[in-house]
Image: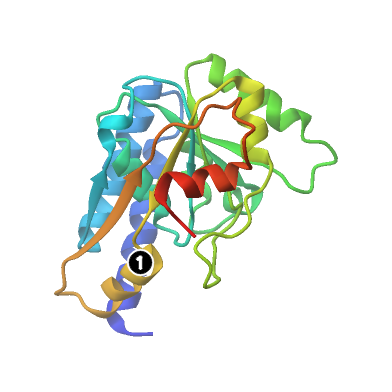
Amino acid sequence: MTLHRIKTALYALYLTNKFGFKLRGEHSANDVTKLRLEYAETLLSHLKISINVEGADKINKGQLYLIVSNHRSIIDPLIVEMALKKTGINGLWVAKKELYNSFFFGMFTRNAGTVLLDREAKTMNGFFTEIKKRVKSGYSICVFAEGTRNKTADTLAEFKEGAQIIAMKNRLPILPVYIETNANEALESSLQNTDRDLTASIIVGDVIDYKDRSDTLQALYKSRFDLN
């Protein structure tokens, strides 16, 4: 591991826990969103990765959505945060139990506005009840429908069924966003070359009606971005 990688990892750890600490306690939804965005902008700036957002005009400001994204990199949540900037959307991320217990991400994940997904739980009733409660409080829900990072050569890994269930149970229009740039490759480039400015692109697609049963959610998502 190079010195630059070590320094970047230590700075990211410091920043993640700094904002995780700031987010402790009671905060308004707007304050949580503001702090998360500040975190995203600060870390991406340090990595010299700028975000290009296409189709942001398709987002209705303040609308409640189920926001569905593809997932290849640990910085994908930051990219989605940037896409939602100035939209008036306060989103909660669905986060795996492993992230809650992570040395690196634990404090931030627990405090930054997330809904815990425990895949080892005997029943998912508590998870869906918590989602419904948060939606009624005015929150959108953000998910990576593949369930985990896609490390294959395929454009998308198989979508989990949970995303569509969330949309149906809460009557949420589905806002598809597609991180066109392989953010993992952009992150790797950043870690290798401190002088290179990089850009990651994310596209906002046309809304998918939660009642649409013409095809699977994955197929409908692909159709929004002409993916094979």
Q: Nearer the viewer, residue 139 or 100?
A: 139
Q: Say which residue appears at 74% left-offset and 47% top-offset.
A: 119
Q: Say which residue appears at 54% left-offset and 63% top-offset.
A: 150
Query: Where does the image place residue 92, in percent across and percent down from the top left?
Result: 49, 33
| Quadrant, the N terminus | bottom left
Query: Where does the image place residue 132, in percent across and percent down from the top left?
Result: 63, 21
**What residue does disc 1 label?**
10
The residue under label 1 is which amino acid type? Leu
Q: Nearer the viewer, residue 162 or 91?
A: 162
Label 1 Cα neighbours within 10 Å, binned few <14 / some 14-19 / many ≥20: few
The colour style of the image is rainbow
Depicted 20 relative to depicted 133: above or below? below
Answer left or right for 185 relative to 112. Answer: left
Depicted 21 relative to depicted 91: above or below? below
**Residue extending farthest front:** 214
Image mark count: 1
Query: Where does the image place residue 70, in percent across and percent down from the top left?
Result: 48, 52
Q: Say which residue appears at 26% left-offset and 44% top-offset.
A: 54
Q: Is residue 187 visible?
A: yes
